[in-house]
Image: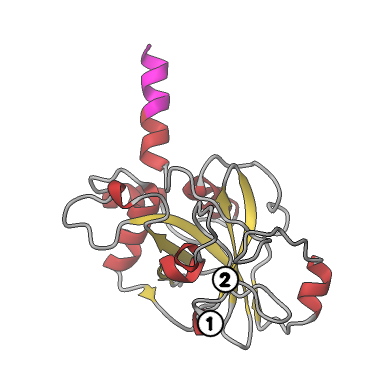
Amino acid sequence: MRNLLLLFLTLFMTACSYKPLDIIFGNDKGTVQEIDEQEYESKLEILKEFDLDEYVGTKTAYDCSSFVSLVNKKHDNRFYEEDDVANFYDRSGRKSKAIYNLYADSGRIVFDDPNAGDLIFFSDTFSKKSRWKNDSENITHVGIVTKVYPDESVEFVHYANKIIKVGYMNLNKKNTFKGKNKIENSYIVDCKSFNIDCLSSSHFAGYGRVK
């Protein structure tokens, strides 16, 4: 019984969003469309890059914050010290929010000019019912920026829907899923109607600037 209780507490304290869904390949009509990754990359010049390809498509984490912590540990605490994060949990109990609080406390939440290797935060990716009273941010999801392009769009890697995957965001085309040659904003929440409100750009809450 004690072991089961400890397991429950561990999952609760590290959960980021209860079941975020990032539909990478699809369109606003709900039709899935396969896109060749090599062809996709060839159409863009990469301005900044932080390689996490070894994780994509794997299940080496169990939620978004555990994935970030995994990368953090491998890169000598690049993002944070775990002891520091422990001081920033709030009533939500989400580690993604604790990480956000840590960055906000040190003035490292920014909304433009991201670097590859920065963190990227999202809000309300699960349900507004999960919002605590007086919690204006309701941070529920976190990923890692892996590529920044000259058009200011970004690629990020995150854990969603039981797998580590790639997502995209372009704040200059906030309501667009797919442009002529590339995905502008991937879906970040479970949205059966493929509504634009479910795009990553609609839930963006800031970048965590890594020193």
The residue that disc 1 covers is: 173
The magenta segment is 1-8
Image quarter of the C terminus:
bottom left
Q: Residue 96 at what x, y percent from top left?
A: 40, 53
**Residue extending furthest toward the bottom:** 150
Of residues 180 and 40, which is closer to you in this image?
180
Q: Residue 191 at what x, y percent from top left?
A: 51, 54
Residue 59 image-quadrant placement: top right
Kindly check if marks 1 and 2 are in contact, taking CB atoms under 8 A apart as contact: yes
Label 1 to label 2, Cα distance in Å? 8 Å
The secondary structure type at the circle numbered 1 is helix
* Whether residue 12 is situated above or below residue 57 in the rendered picture: above
Q: Residue 111 at what x, y percent from top left?
A: 40, 78
Sequence-wise, the earlier of marks 1 and 2 is: 1
Residue at 77 percent across and 73 percent down: it is 40
> What residue type is disc 1 on?
Lys
Label 1 Cα neighbours within 10 Å, binned few <14 / some 14-19 / many ≥20: some
* Whether residue 201 is situated above or below residue 126 in the rendered picture: below
Does the stretch in magenta take in 6? yes
> What residue type is disc 2 on?
Asn
Residue 13 image-quadrant placement: top left
The residue that disc 2 covers is: 185
Q: Is residue 21 left or right of residue 86?
A: right
